[in-house]
Image (tube, rainbow, N blue to C red):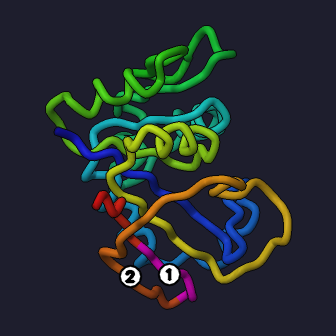
Amino acid sequence: MRKLVVTEFVTLDGVVAEPQEWSFPYWAEEIGKFKYDEHFASDALLLGRVTYEGFAAAWPTRTDEQGFAERMNSLPKYVVSTTLNKLEWNNSHLIKENVPEEVAKLKQQAGMDIVVHGCPTLLQTLMQHDLVDEYHLLIYPIILGKGKRLFTDGTSASLRLTESKSFSSGVTLLRYEPDRK
């Protein structure tokens, strides 16, 4: 069975929206290595519409010597959306209904991790149906005071910390698993 891993860039006050506007000043090679290792431990992406549209606009034209972009572009991408009808990005598949059932089927397939980048709205559905196996939260030392938050009012979960690591730029990795007692 595959693991569903949610990976997020999060401010101290819980904002996840538009990380390209606030995360870059804190980037460090060690964060890049973590993201590289995380990326190559997966063989599929699960994305909401907003994240898909942002990624699809940026990744197809990117290249790099490490092969990150090539892998991003070649991975199967499962996109949850009720409004999209056609997906242009290579190897993308649309999930329009029965999201919990379809994600559960993906998890039952043989393979590596399925990674969810961003997608706080999708995350709420995944959490409600106990489909998340790991949370990789990169906490950035910045408070924005506004913006879309990772967890909305009413969200609840018991989590168990499995790893914490501080990076030289002040970013902290918190890795959690659901505490399914």
Q: Is residue 179 left or right of residue 23?
A: left
Residue found 55% across the figure and 17% down from its top = 88
Residue 89 lies, in percent from the top left, at: 51, 23
User: Is residue 58 one of those drawn in magenta?
Assistant: no
User: Is residue 170 one of those drawn in magenta?
Assistant: yes
Q: Which residues are magenta?
A: 169-174
Residue 119 lies, in percent from the top left, at: 59, 43
| Label 1 close to label 2 by CB (< 8 Å) | yes
Q: Secondary structure at mark 1?
A: strand
Q: Which mark is residue 55?
A: none
Q: Which residue is mark 2?
A: 164
Q: Is residue 65 left or right of residue 58?
A: left
Residue found 32% across the figure and 29% down from its top = 104
Disc 1 or 2, which lies upstream in sequence? 2
Q: Quadrant of residue 52?
A: top right
Q: Which mark is residue 172?
A: 1
Q: Quadrant of residue 153?
A: bottom right
Residue found 43% across the figure and 64% down from its top = 158
Q: Mark 2 is on which residue type? A: Ser
Q: Mark 1 is on which residue type? A: Thr
Residue 125 lies, in percent from the top left, at: 54, 37
